[in-house]
Amino acid sequence: MTELSPSLEALVAELGKLPGIGRKTALRLGLHLLLQAGRTRELAAALLRAAEHCRFCQKCGNLGEDELCPICRNPARDAGLICVVEQVPDLLAIERVGEYRGVYHVLGGVLSPLDGVGPEQLRLAELERRVGGGPVREVVLATSATVEGDATALYLQRLLQGGALRISRLARGLPSGGSLESADQLTLARALDGRERLS
Amino acid sequence: MTELSPSLEALVAELGKLPGIGRKTALRLGLHLLLQAGRTRELAAALLRAAEHCRFCQKCGNLGEDELCPICRNPARDAGLICVVEQVPDLLAIERVGEYRGVYHVLGGVLSPLDGVGPEQLRLAELERRVGGGPVREVVLATSATVEGDATALYLQRLLQGGALRISRLARGLPSGGSLESADQLTLARALDGRERLS
């Protein structure tokens, strides 16, 4: 079998380290880039620019280009309301809704002992410090509706509770547009448990 | 809605130009890279090395690092047998079988008028020159078993036929391991048409 040329092999190996990209896809991406002269260098330049300029917000862990991210710098945002999310894409998803006016705290993952992620691996001390040090009224736990997300929320609840701090969790129930028939048992059970009284 | 930082936005835009990668995946990949310090620069370095060193074989269009690719340079390969493929991954797939001892010709695509790919966009003149100029006994048309692949093979057959040149096409039939029941009508029809007499 013919080997790839050394530099292509190295590129395929690097691309193959990306999440969800296997060797076959990595080879396809690598060839695609090399087939279009200039694209390879453009992507490399974008990567280097991002590596140079992007940094994590010292306060919330969001990505920005300064010490504090645009959300933490924005005086119109309510610093008394902290929404705790797993990763930056979760923050972006909530921002897309356009209704949330508080600030965020990015944990950097969920508790997952099997994957070696314990409390020390997440940005928990920073969160405790923020909650303890400022006029924080409410913490919204917006981890995923998964076993790990629930466990992390429970851990955070125990860690933070006390005083007048309100701790909340995103609502669980039927997803909008979802039919009752196609909902799984757990979703339906949570929707029943959390039923809202109308009158 | 919060905008991404300019350098991250530029990176996501570049990643999103890759085939099969939408904006959401591009954002996930970009964040993944930035979360692991050093990985972004390593990928950029691999891209630059590949852009600098990789080049297409002057003869067959395969990717290598010299004027001629390792296959064209190999005196043990039969230069009288040319296998015509669409793209470099197809060549690699045939090499993986490990039985083919001839050389290749990479077209760079298939005829597809709707996508603006005509004969001028493919490496057809180079193929004609190779077939006309050397002791080529046989050309194996190994384009895909698709409408475009078949049309390209037919075009090549008409372009090249004449003299003692043998032109062949990859066999069509049931895929190995495929059940008859699950085979589509066209595959089954081709398998019947091409049935081999056993006795």
Image (tube, coloured by chain):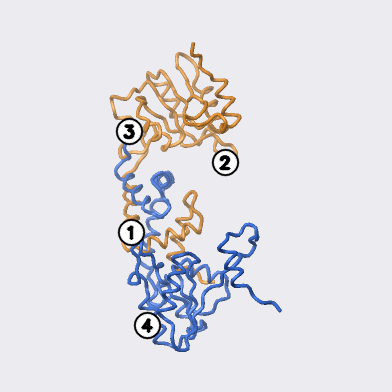
Chain colours: A orange, B blue
Q: Which residue carries the number 2 mark?
A: A115
Left or right of residue A82: residue A198? right
- Circle number at residue A39: 1
Q: Earlier in the sequence, mark 2 or mark 1?
A: 1
Q: Quadrant of residue B129?
A: bottom left
- Where residue B174 appears, x then y in whole percent? 61, 65
Disc 1 residue type? Arg
Viewer-nearest of discs 4 and 1 = 4
**The C terminus of chain B: image quadrant:** bottom right
The residue located at (55%, 63%) in the rendering is B186
Q: Specify whether disc 2 shares its chain with disc 1.
A: yes
State the residue in front, B70 or A180.
Answer: A180
- Circle number at residue B129: 4
Helix, strand or loop for disc 4: helix
Provide the chain ID for the residue under circle 4: B
Provide the chain ID for the residue under circle 2: A
Provide the chain ID for the residue under circle 1: A
Q: Which residue carries the number 3 mark?
A: B1
- Where residue A99 appears, x then y in whole percent? 36, 26
**Label 3, label 4: how many angstroms apart (C-alpha)?**
58 Å
Disc 3 residue type? Met
Q: Specify whether disc 3 shares its chain with disc 4.
A: yes
Q: Earlier in the sequence, mark 3 or mark 4?
A: 3
User: Label 1: how many residues lie within 10 Å, few (<14), some (14-19) or many (20+)?
Assistant: some
Marks 3 & 4, CB-CB < 8 Å contact:
no
Q: Quadrant of residue B65?
A: bottom left
Viewer-nearest of discs 3 and 4 = 4
Left or right of residue A135: residue A147? right
State the residue in front, A105 or B159.
Answer: B159
Disc 2 residue type? Asp
Marks 2 & 1, CB-CB < 8 Å contact:
no
Q: Specify whether disc 4 shares its chain with disc 2.
A: no
